[in-house]
Image: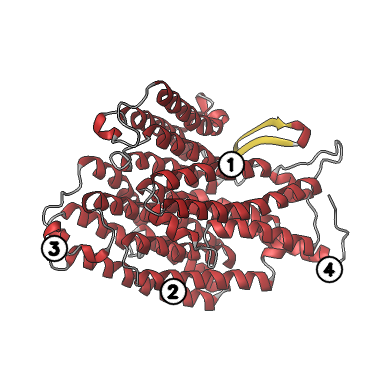
Amino acid sequence: MSAFLTSIGYQHWVLPALLVIPLAGALVIWVHGAVTRPRCAPGGDEVATGVAAAPRGWALATFAIEFVVSLGLWWSFDPGNTGWQSVVDWSWIPMWGIRFTLGIDGIAVMMVLLTTLIMLLAVGGSWTSIRARTHSYYALLLVLTAGMLGVFLALDLFLFYVMWEVMLVPMYFIIGIWGGERRIYASLKFFLYTMVGSMLMLAAIVYLGLAARDPATGLPNFNYDWILQHALVGSTTAKWLFGAFFLAFAVKVPMFPFHTWLPDAHVEAPTAGSVVLASIMLKLGTFGFIRLAVPLFPAAAMSPTIRSIILLLAVIGIVYGALVSLVQPDFKKLVAYSSVSHLGFVMLGIFALTVQSVQGALMVMINHGISTGALFFLIGMIYERRHTRLIDDYGGIARVVPMFAAMLTIVTFSSIGVPGTNGFVGEFLVLIGSFRTEPVFALVATTVVIISAAYLLWAIQRILFNSLDKPENEHVPDLNKRELAVLIPLVACIVWLGVYPAPVLRRMEGAATKFVSQVDARRDAMVTADAQSAPEVQP
């Protein structure tokens, strides 16, 4: 396979193609929507009239092509090469020193593959639940995909910011138009929370670009590697700049106490919106810490005070998310709060700063995307049948929908980290790696595993295995072939990554090792330079 990919020059065009394909698909769907007016009343049921068939068919084909194209990265990527691969570097806005630079490492490869898989399945999960304005919905999903992939691929900080904002707008409309009763409130809250952090991040990026200006031309330089080497800032300035990046990424993760937008967005979003939020968009925050915030400002990020505060917030988030999930009557909100707890493990792993803990954090990012995405798919599927998310409205439905019950049980075991499932691998590595440098925080986080088991097992007991005492649950149809086609790939990934995670860990090991060694080395160098009172370069 590698030889074939080399023969077609795969590495030279794959990254731009991953951005162009969804944008081209969105354009086709929008044009089709403009020239073929829906044959039903405004706000009517397009699925019933057959109007939805064309846009969802185009979307499915586009996402299938996108996934197949991205799949080649699994073979073309060289795990032994810790540098950037498949690099594309084009001039974009030369008068400002901005370039269109893309590249991948082991972390980006796995995030890209996760994104293209989840987005393909999201079309299947939306097949009958989205019944109006289908052209706009699927076009926005495609634009959202381009934005998220752009964040993972960007090696120019200004391009990173542009892609960060590109993905914000489609999700705002997806929640605001196709969401639940409180969709306007939830979408505005989501937009405003993320926008405030984004504006601060933009100011920090501009500062860095000016501080790292090219001495020959005097133009700003936003290249990631160039800024790492040439953006020399003093300790005080570094803390302010790190604070700007921290706020942008902490809101997106979301870390406690910046998490309050998440339950509203999850509950009000349509099923695919909740899946994309949980599986991919939350990972953009943790990815931002790994790619930008910590490597650019290691002395600030890893200073004893700031590091302790972040670790404390991460562990508070782990405990808080689990305890709040324990008392939720709404199954969807329960899963939403569980994300706060799971992403706390990622932050713990990153700031514990060992190779094991960072690899564990990366595995939790992937595994949470798979398991929580599957949970939201299952919640959406049962909601289409019963139109309620309240746990007490169910009971004993395993007798009626055995396939749904089997899938929900497997995914729940994955989410609580049962050995043999993917959830166990990531959390185990985080806890083992974190214990080496932060034993107290690791021990507190370990106790939450018990709470996680409690809130999820109690929930599925009340939904699946109590008495079947409500007549409306006695004739609920089981999962159909389309729904099984959405869930089976996720269940397969749960088992594969739980039993044999080595191929994924091997691809990310080089990037994780480089991250830890780079942060350690740059932190020591910056501390030494600051002690010698090195002059600060002003933009």
Q: Position of residue 331 (x, y in %)?
A: 31, 62
Which of discs 3 and 4 lies nearer the camera? The answer is 3
Name the residue type under label 1: Met
Q: Nearer the viewer, residue 32 or 144?
A: 32
**Residue found at x 45% / y 51%:** 184
N-term mark: 2 or 4: 2
**Do the residues bearing badges 1 and 2 touch, measured as CB atoms within 8 Å?**
no
Tell me the quarter of the picture where residue 399 sits: bottom left
Q: Position of residue 234 (x, y in %)?
A: 81, 61
N-term mark: 1 or 3: 1
- Quarter of the figure with the N terminus: top left
In the rendered structure, find residue 446 and report the number of the disc placed on it.
2
How far apart marks 3 and 4 lie (CA) works out to: 71 Å
* Relative vertical location of residue 215 with respect to residue 247 in this rendering, above or below: above
Name the residue type under label 3: Lys
How far apart marks 1 and 4 lie (CA) works out to: 37 Å
Which of discs 2 and 3 lies nearer the camera? The answer is 3
**Residue found at x 48% / y 77%:** 443
SS state under label 1: helix
SS state under label 2: helix
Q: Position of residue 144 (x, y in %)?
A: 49, 40
Q: Residues within 10 Å of mark 3 (few under 14, many from 20)?
A: few
Q: Is residue 516 visible?
A: no
Name the residue type under label 4: Ala
Which residue is denoted by mark 4 in the rendering? 531
Which of discs 1 and 4 lies nearer the camera? The answer is 1
Q: Residues within 10 Å of mark 2 (few under 14, many from 20)?
A: some
